[in-house]
């Protein structure tokens, strides 16, 4: 009876750990470095990750997942396997807007 409990507990623990592993990490393909791309994307090693970064530097930000297939060594099958892992965003961070009240205070102190 104890061995059955041990087996069931082991199976439940395995399922719990596997569930966490199946949750895919997402990366912003327009800002991620080659090491992150290599780590997160499936069937993309260091050389392909470097090719993605080089393509991005030469051609600008990716606008669609399918555009990744234009990178040498990346095929449509690889793109499909990674679709849920890839996100897109602004290539650079925007500066926060200045407060109107703060701008008026500066003018009033002159």
Image: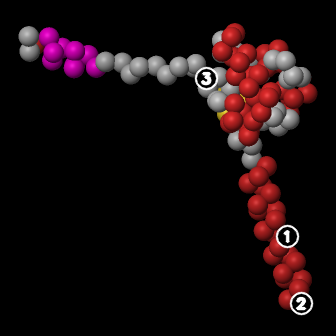
Q: Judging from the image, what secondary structure is the residue with disc 2 in?
A: loop
- Which residue lies under the disc numbered 3? 89
Residue 101 belongs to the span the image colors magenta = yes
Q: Secondary structure at mark 3?
A: loop
The picture quadrant where one finds residue 25 is top right
Residue 36 part of the magenta-drawn span: no
- Most common SS among magenta residues: helix
Q: Residue under circle 2?
A: 1
- Disc 1 to disc 2, how far (Cα)? 16 Å
- Distance Cα–Cα, label 1 vs label 3: 40 Å
Q: Residues within 10 Å of mark 3 (few under 14, many from 20)?
A: some
Q: Residues within 10 Å of mark 1 (few under 14, many from 20)?
A: few
Magenta segment range? 99-107
Work out which quarter of the rendered image holds the C terminus and state it. top left
Q: Nearer the viewer, mark 2 or mark 3?
A: 3
> Whole-percent x and y of residue 109?
8, 15
């Amino acid at each position: 009876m104890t061995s059955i409990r041990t087996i069931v507990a082991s199976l439940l623990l395995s399922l719990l750990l596997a569930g966490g592993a199946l949750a895919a990490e997402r990366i912003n393909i327009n800002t991620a470095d080659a090491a992150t791309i290599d780590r997160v994307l499936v069937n993309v090693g260091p050389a392909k990750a470097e090719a993605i970064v080089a393509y991005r530097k030469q051609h600008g930000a990716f606008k669609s997942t399918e555009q990744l297939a234009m990178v040498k060594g990346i095929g449509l099958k690889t793109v499909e396997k990674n679709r849920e892992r890839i996100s897109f965003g602004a290539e650079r961070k925007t500066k926060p807007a200045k407060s109107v009240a703060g701008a008026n205070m500066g003018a009033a102190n002159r």
